[in-house]
Amino acid sequence: MRLKDKAIIVTGGTSGIGAAIATAAIREGASVLVHGINEAEGKATVERLGSKAVLCIADLIQDSAPETIIKSALAAFGKIDGLVNNAAIFGGKNISEQEIEHFRAMIQVNLTAPLFLIKAAFEELKKTGGCVLNIGSINAHAGESKLLAYSISKGGMQTMTRNLANANGVHGVRVNQINPGWVLTEREYRDKIAVGLKPSWPQDLNRTDIPSGVMTTPEQMAEGAIYWLSDESRPFTGSVVDLEQFTIIGRNPEKLG
């Protein structure tokens, strides 16, 4: 088992990519603190995951949340081997519609909270030779016009990953990032239904949308995450890996064929 006896924190771990990472980590022998904001959803998730999962409810919009999460992990496991910064607010506005409060919330949850989670966990990660895995987005490279604040937050995360990796490899703490592309999460499915797509929309996509013909799943993202959480990826740090079906930054249907 690739994560045997490791203690891992997964923020935003009650659904989507986060829940898939938590599931895979437990399968590989880890104990996992599953963080979320929806208590009912969180309880259902940890019940499904079993005795090696514990739940922590904390709203990352609050400055106190990072300390709460780290203290909960230490109370449950006595150590921290890995931190997965997965929780994020998605959506956004273009420049004409951007509101300052929306921008502040996006930066707080998607960038400030991950930074201070790393800070709160840092001494424990030094003790274990642990690692951080930040879950970014291909939107970090530029992003869609309607995802302005989200793209800025993920671009900041990418810089944060490389800065912390450069500074702290000497301390034995590795910091890496994966940038998912378009993933068929429960939220993505619901969002597309809400804007008028048919229930069968994932099967109706053509290869200008999805080159392989099949959308990427949270479980596939989780398998990529396991490598970076495991000792197999040691000593690599500062890596930012795009996990996207196009071999260019973003999506450009004109590249098809």
Image (cartoon, helix red, strand yellow):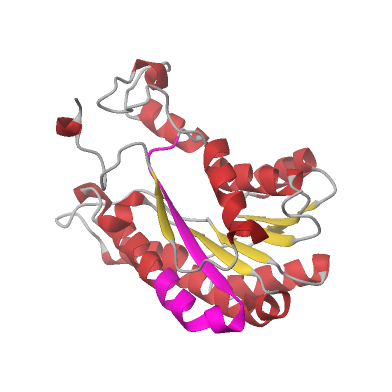
Residue toward you, 33 or 214: 214
Residue at (37%, 25%) from the top-left corner?
212
Whether residue 47 sits left or right of residue 119 in the image: it is right
- The tally of labels here is 0
Residue at (61%, 78%) from the top-left corner?
172
Whether residue 122 sits left or right of residue 78 in the image: it is left
Residue at (32%, 23%) from the top-left corner?
196
Question: What is the quadrant of residue 32 in the picture?
Answer: bottom right
Where is residue 135? Give x, y as percent: 48, 56
Q: Is residue 193 magenta?
A: no
- Residue 230 visible in image: no
Where is residue 166? Give x, y as percent: 45, 79
Where is residue 184? Give x, y as percent: 46, 33
Is 75 situated above or below 223? Answer: below
The magenta stretch is 160-183
Where is residue 11? Give x, y as percent: 59, 58
- Residue 206 visible in image: yes
Q: Is residue 181 magenta?
A: yes
Residue at (20%, 37%) from the top-left corner?
252
Whether residue 250 sits left or right of residue 233 in the image: it is left
Residue toward you, 207 or 11: 207
- Quadrant for the C terminus, please: top left
Residue toward you, 241 or 180: 241
